[in-house]
Image: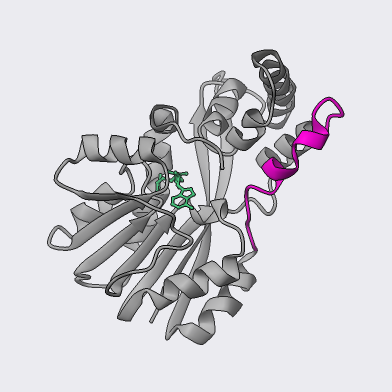
Amino acid sequence: MPQWDAAQYLKFAGERTRPAIDLLQRIELSAPSRIIDLGCGPGNSTEPLRARWPEATIVGLDSSPDMIAAARNSYPQGTWEVGDAASWKADRPFDLVFANAMLHWLPDHARICRHWMEQVAPGGALAVQQPAHYDGAMRREILEVSQHPAWSDRMHAARAAITCEAPPFYYDVLRPLASRVSLWETAYYHILAGPEGVLEWFRGTGLRPFLDALASHEERARFEAMLLEKYSAAYPRRASGEVLFPFRRLFFVAYR
Ligand SMILES: C[S@@+](CC[C@H](N)C(=O)[O-])C[C@H]1O[C@@H](n2cnc3c(N)ncnc32)[C@H](O)[C@@H]1O
């Protein structure tokens, strides 16, 4: 498991939180009374949940003590727990099980989705958003650099750290357990100062397992320089000097 760094993650807090807001706005529940935010990170996805449903009891759960400390710091009155979302079991069912930008860090999505649906109360919902990494330059470039002979044999775990299935997979798993399933994708075009921005973005998330597998600062600098060269070609500067960074995300909501 990569180490999570709340400060690095929050460098793009606005961009990272927008999909959480888009997901929660599409959830057709009027007044869920018990909500859990799995992989809540520094609390940036929990806050919009609280804004939409201020009367609800909301729990934020994350496996990273650093993230939970940041969440508690930003909202001390909240209920924050360090725990593993893959094995987490509700003492009582939740009306809304919400997981924004975290499912892809877990393997075996069929088992996880079924397990999370079991924690949803009748009439409630499971709502998930994750990057649609099953096709896209940003992840392909990282995987290509990871194949370099200097470190390829140390990258097996990093390459397997993220799991993303295509939309029909989630539909087939969830439909037998749900009264209704809704799925969609959105492409966000983030505007970054330059291709270095794309690298900086991934330092807070998908690049971490790869950098953690390298032995020294020099190796990490070399890995990042190779990746930056590829990102400079994949994300050319516009006339403004900025780059457009397209990021597709998959959303689904399954109602019990
Ligand atoms: C990309 S961040 C998402 C944070 C926040 N939900 C958001 O919408 O921006 C992924 C979070 O998932 C957490 N995470 C990864 N694996 C986990 C696990 N097995 N159980 C709980 N949290 C996990 C990480 O610590 C990290 O805070």
Which quadrant, please, contains the C terminus? bottom left
34 sits to left or right of 115: left
Note whether residue 245 is visible: yes
Q: Residue at x 45, y 61 (%)?
A: 128
Q: Determine if the magenta segment contains residue 229.
A: no
The colour mode here is one colour
From the top left corner, tell me how far across and down residue 221 is, in percent.
67, 16
From the top left corner, tell me how far across and down residue 103 is, in percent.
51, 57
Q: Residue at x 60, y 67 (%)?
A: 167
Q: Determine if the magenta segment contains residue 148.
A: yes
Q: Determine which quarter of the picture holds residue 209.
A: top right
Q: Which residues are magenta?
A: 147-165
From the top left corner, tell me how far across and down residue 179 is, in percent.
42, 86
- Of residues 176 and 118, the one drawn nearer to the viewer in this rendering: 118
Note whether residue 243 is visible: no
Which quadrant, please, contains the N terminus? top right
Q: Residue at x 61, y 23 (%)?
A: 195
What is the chief secondary structure element of the magenta stretch?
A: loop
Q: Residue at x 14, y 57 (%)?
A: 54
- Of residues 95 and 76, the one drawn nearer to the viewer in this rendering: 76
Q: Residue furthest toward the top?
A: 218
71 sits to left or right of 235: left
Q: Determine which quarter of the picture holds residue 124.
A: bottom left
Query: In the figure, 81 relative to 8: above or below?
Result: below
Q: Residue furthest toward the right?
A: 149
Query: In the figure, 219 relative to 3: above or below?
Result: above
| Count of marks overlaid on the render | 0
From the top left corner, tell me how far across and down residue 83 is, in percent.
39, 52
254 sits to left or right of 53: right
71 sits to left or right of 210: left
